[in-house]
Image (cartoon, grey):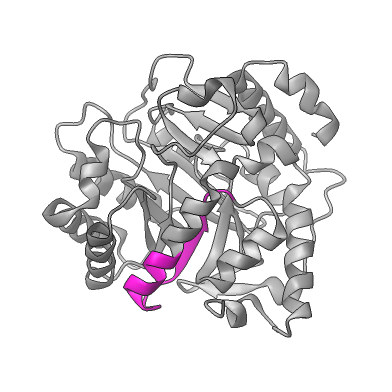
Amino acid sequence: MTFALRPALFALHPERAHRLTIRGLAAWGAIGTPGARRFDDPMLATRVADIDFGNPLGVAAGVDKDGEAVAGLHALGFGAVEVGTLTPLPQAGNAKPRLFRLVADRGVINRMGFNNGGLDGGLARLPAKRRGVLGLNVGANKDAADRIADYVTGVGKAAAITDYVTINVSSPNTPGLRDLQHGQPLRDLLAATRAAAGTRPLFLKVAPDLTPAAIDDIARAVIDHRLDALIVGNTTVSRPPLASPARNEMGGLSGAPLAALAAERLGDFRRATGGAIPLIAAGGIDSGEEAYARIRAGASLVQLYSAMVYAGPGLPQRLLRDLAALLRRDGFASVGEAVGTG
């Protein structure tokens, strides 16, 4: 579980390397994460959606799809782990190969297609005792006759176990899924899942590939339906200039090439919501400096995934140390004080 393993992991196909990493984290967590030394600084503690986070850094959905490595990921330093995406029924996802490293660009392209072992199996693996916040990201099965019903099932079951639930309607790898981000379908989805969640905090994860009109529409809908946070955003189907051989693969792009678009979209949603709902920034976050910039731009929390492929498992600790130093440098006593001050 050290950065020294990267050459060996990079010699493997990306999906196999990911599976081995999750198995290693799961085994490490199962034996109590020996030698784990989390960076804990009281000034990084924050409260969002009535949830107390030890720090604002979360691991995004997609890392631990089936809830196998929650303890190991918390031990790396993450204040929150978002498991999933889980669908009501198991599904294999799209045909392989479906995961590609863009090493020259420090990016990743995936077209996984919500591959997972199913909601019930994932929920059964979640630890009752944990060192941080636990969220669950839910989706709809590809062949579902009623996708909203799938989300209601996922939210209802997850709400009984996790600290928050995220509705994921922003993956580009399930045909038609992003249609639920707009208009009446979005409002129908939010009304149904808000009722299913009860008092459990409910988040919505949206794509970065949105028009100004769509951003305004989503902002109104999440406020009207009393959602608790908005995750901005998912992978992008757009393609900035890239140098890696796999740059033309179909799927969602993440990592460093997504940073500028993700930051722009965060600013758009901050303006559209007027600070009425907490925002969670995701996409291209790979350092304390970038996390701090997103917080100053309006994010109450941040999430990462692809950056760990290149920076290794020590990244969360380094990021949090640097973030604490930046907050102190600028005279902030807490993360919350810095939100939206940029």
Q: Could you tell me which residue is drawn at 38 percent across and 55 percent down? A: 159
Give coordinates of residue 89: x percent, y percent. 32, 29
Quadrant including the C terminus: bottom right
- Residue in the picture at 40% in, 36% down: 120
Q: Nearer the viewer, residue 41 or 266?
A: 266
Task: Looking at this view, name the residue that lies furthest to the front.
Answer: 241
Up/down of 279 relative to 240, above or below: below
Horizontal relation, residue 47 to residue 22: left or right: left
Q: Is residue 76 visible?
A: no
Q: Is residue 274 inside the magenta stretch?
A: yes
Q: Which one is in front, 179 or 271?
A: 271
What residue is drawn where x is 66% and y is 22%? 17
Q: Residue at x 15, y 51 (%)?
A: 185
**Quarter holding residue 20:** top right
Does 37 lie within the magenta span?
A: no
Q: Picture coordinates of residue 155 (x, y %)?
A: 32, 51
158 sits left or right of 297 in the view? left
Q: Residue 113's quadrant in the figure?
A: top left
Q: Position of residue 272 (x, y in %)?
A: 32, 71
- In this rendering, position of residue 180 left or right of residue 110: left
Give the number of marks: 0
Residue 131 percent coordinates (x, y): 67, 57
- Which span of residues is magenta-colored? 267-284
